[in-house]
Image (tube, rainbow, N blue to C red):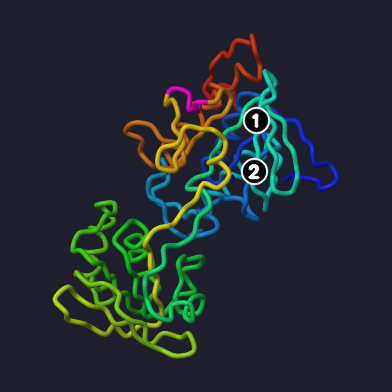
Amino acid sequence: MKTNTPNIPCHETDVVVIGAGPVGLFAVFECGMLGMSCHVIDALESLGGQCAALYPEKPIYDIPAHPVLEAGQLIENLISQIEPFDPVYHLNQQAVFMKEEGADGWCVTTTTGTQIRAKAVVIAAGVGAFGPNRPPLGGLADYEGKSVFYMVRRRDDFKGKRLVIAGGGDSAVDWAVSLAEVAEKIYVVHRRDKFRAAPETVRRMHELAEQGDVVEIVTPYQLGALHGQNGMMTALEVTDFDGGSRMLEADVLLPFFGLASKIGPIADWQLELQQNHIVVDPSTCETNRAGIFAVGDIACYKNKLKLILTGFSEAATAAHAIHPRVFPGQALHFEYSTSKGVPL
């Protein structure tokens, strides 16, 4: 894996990919299959975006040909898949400036001063810079990192523990199902009886609750107060909407209330935005500025589905739209990978 060299801050490439999450990595593959070189910029210290930083052991169920795949394994597979194309990674730095250089494309500058000139830019920044939405609990900061966690890096960290999982979305339900295999007890606390998660996973969670004593669904309740000392939780008080309360004896709180995200410098790049998402033409994934493309969760258009699978498709679409910018006048003869193969 190549990384940027501090002594050589200026680079030339065909495509700059901003964001090293799963969609950004797959964009490198699609560009590589069309003979285009890529440099990849990411603010994190390692590849993989949220999948690696927030939930490497989270199971993913909607990757084709993989009934279940851990997020970390997905990233490892993607990295292996693009190795033949020899991408250059610029990690632990953020893309802050973009300057148009006429017909030659764009020059992207990072927070370290590194400059990368390219014919096209693919923004695959996911939800942008992200952080957890914290529950409004007194003394929360004292417990964070000790018994309150906003992500699961390793399931075994919670082996034999009594957990409170708070939230009603995919993360809460997915982890309730997954951690039921290792935890002593799981309370799933949500303010509504209905969960906003994949129906099949919700069904599995209810099935676990009905069949055993590990998973208990606590609805409609909301978080009330943390109990413990020196940052170590011993119980969590939850309240209903009639003034009643209940004490849950637990060691760990996992609040999954989504991420607060900011798109950062991207907001100043004169791109058409819609609620902090970049508007693109779905037929090319190009933005309102020629040569700048957006794929994955940060891209938006009518009826967009926020799935990794959708992002993969957008990466292929963008790569094919970029090809004539990198190779003007050269016809692109489409070939399936089974016929073309991958450089070794």
Give the residue displayed 38% in from the left and 50% down from the top. 61
Q: Which mark is residue 327?
A: none
Q: Residue furthest bottom?
A: 229
In this picture, residue 321 sits left or right of residue 344: left
- What is the x, y in percent for residue 85? 68, 34
Give the residue displayed 32% in from the left and 33% down from the top. 303
In this picture, residue 227 sits left or right of residue 298: left
Image quarter of the N terminus: top right
In-front residue for pair 36/76: 36
Q: Amino acid at mark 1?
A: Val
- What is the x, y in percent for residue 204? 26, 60
Q: Secondary structure at mark 2?
A: strand
Q: Which residue is mark 1?
A: 15
Q: Secondary structure at mark 1?
A: strand
Q: Is residue 284 magenta?
A: yes
Q: Which residues are magenta?
A: 283-288
Q: Which residue is mark 2?
A: 96
